Image (cartoon, helix red, strand yellow):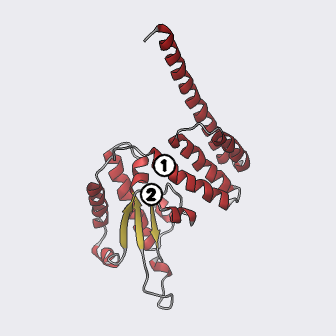
C-alpha cells in the first residue's frame, strides 16, 4: 500500500473512532437528561441522533431504545411502541453470529433453576408452559412488551384467581435467549442471569410484585 493510501486509511479509521465517541457522548447526555426528568429534551436530542441515518444497526437500536423510553416518559405510548418495533428489527440485524451457549444447554440451565423450587410449588407449575424464543414477537412488542425484556410471565397470577374468573387459565413463561445473551459477557454470567429470570417470572405466577422481587434480589 502506498504512503498516500495508508494515510487515507488511517484518516478514515480516526474519523470512525471520533464518530463513535461522538455518538456515545450524545447517548450519555440523552440518558442524563432522561434520568434528570427532562424527557422532552432527551427525546429531541435522540431524534436528531437517529435522523442522521448513518448508524450501524447496534448503535441505532441503542439510540432508538432510549428514545422509546423518553417518549414513554412523555406520555407518547404510540411513539414508544413504534420505536420498540424498530429496535426489535435492528437488534435482530445486529445479533452476533455465535451464541454464548447452545440451545440445549440454555434449556438445561433453565430446568435446573426450576428444580430449585420446592416440590409443592413445582406441582402448581405443571400446567405452566415455559417457552424459549430469541426475542419477543412483533405482536408482543406492538402490544406493549419491551423488545429487550429478558423474560415475561403471561397469565393470571395465583393471587388474583377465583373460581368465577373464567378458568381454565392459560399461563406461559417466556425466556428470551438473545436478549439474555445480549446483557452477558460470559457463559457463567448467562447461566446466572437465566436462573434469576426463571425464578423472577415464576414468582410473578405466584403473585409477587416487582418491588418484592427487587427486595429478594430477583430483579
Circle 2 packing at 10 Å, graded few (<14), some (14-19), many (20+), is many
Front residue of 94/69: it is: 94
Find disc 1 in the rendering and name its residue: 91
- Up-down relation of residue 143 to residue 48 (above or below): below
Front residue of 218/70: it is: 70
Residue plotted at (54% across, 40% down): 59
In the displayed structure image, the side of residue 4 where residue 111 appears, left or right? left
Q: Position of residue 106 (x, y in %)?
A: 30, 56
**In this orientation, does residue 144 appear?**
no
Residue plotted at (48% across, 59% down): 214
In the displayed structure image, the side of residue 57 where residue 119 appears, left or right? left
**Secondary element type, mark 1:** helix
In the displayed structure image, the side of residue 154 where residue 98 appears, left or right? left
Front residue of 113/42: it is: 42
Residue lying furthest top in this view? 3
Q: Position of residue 216 (x, y in %)?
A: 44, 61
Residue lying furthest bottom in this view? 164
Marks 1 and 2 close (CB-CB < 8 Å):
yes
In which quarter of the view is residue 108 placed?
A: bottom left
In the rendered image, the quadrant that contains the N terminus is top left
Question: Which label sits on residue 135?
Answer: 2
Q: Position of residue 156 (x, y in %)?
A: 48, 77
- Up-down relation of residue 148 to residue 28 (above or below): below
Tell which circle, 1 or 2, labels the residue nearer the N-terminal end.
1
Circle 1 packing at 10 Å, graded few (<14), some (14-19), many (20+), is many
**In this orientation, does residue 122 appear?**
yes
Residue plotted at (70% across, 49% down): 39
Amino acid at each position: 500500500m502506498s504512503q498516500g493510501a495508508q494515510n487515507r486509511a488511517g484518516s478514515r479509521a480516526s474519523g470512525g473512532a471520533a464518530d463513535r465517541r461522538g455518538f456515545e457522548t450524545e447517548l450519555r447526555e440523552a440518558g442524563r437528561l432522561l434520568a434528570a426528568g427532562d424527557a422532552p429534551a432527551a427525546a429531541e436530542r435522540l431524534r436528531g441522533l437517529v435522523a442522521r441515518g448513518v448508524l450501524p444497526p447496534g448503535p441505532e437500536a441503542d439510540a432508538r431504545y432510549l428514545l422509546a423510553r423518553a417518549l414513554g416518559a412523555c406520555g407518547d405510548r404510540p411513539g414508544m411502541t413504534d420505536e420498540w418495533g424498530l429496535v426489535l428489527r435492528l437488534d435482530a440485524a445486529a445479533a452476533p453470529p455465535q451464541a454464548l451457549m447452545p440451545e440445549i444447554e440454555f434449556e438445561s440451565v433453565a430446568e435446573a433453576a426450576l428444580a430449585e423450587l420446592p416440590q409443592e410449588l413445582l406441582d402448581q407449575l405443571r400446567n405452566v408452559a415455559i417457552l424459549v424464543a430469541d426475542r419477543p414477537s412483533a405482536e408482543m412488542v406492538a402490544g406493549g412488551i419491551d423488545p429487550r425484556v429478558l423474560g415475561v410471565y403471561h397469565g393470571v397470577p395465583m393471587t388474583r384467581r377465583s373460581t368465577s374468573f373464567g378458568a381454565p387459565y392459560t399461563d406461559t413463561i417466556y425466556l428470551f435467549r438473545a436478549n439474555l445473551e445480549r446483557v452477558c459477557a460470559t457463559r457463567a454470567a448467562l447461566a446466572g442471569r437465566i436462573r434469576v429470570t426463571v425464578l423472577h417470572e415464576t414468582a410473578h405466577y405466584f403473585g409477587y410484585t416487582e418491588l418484592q422481587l427487587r427486595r429478594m434480589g430477583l430483579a
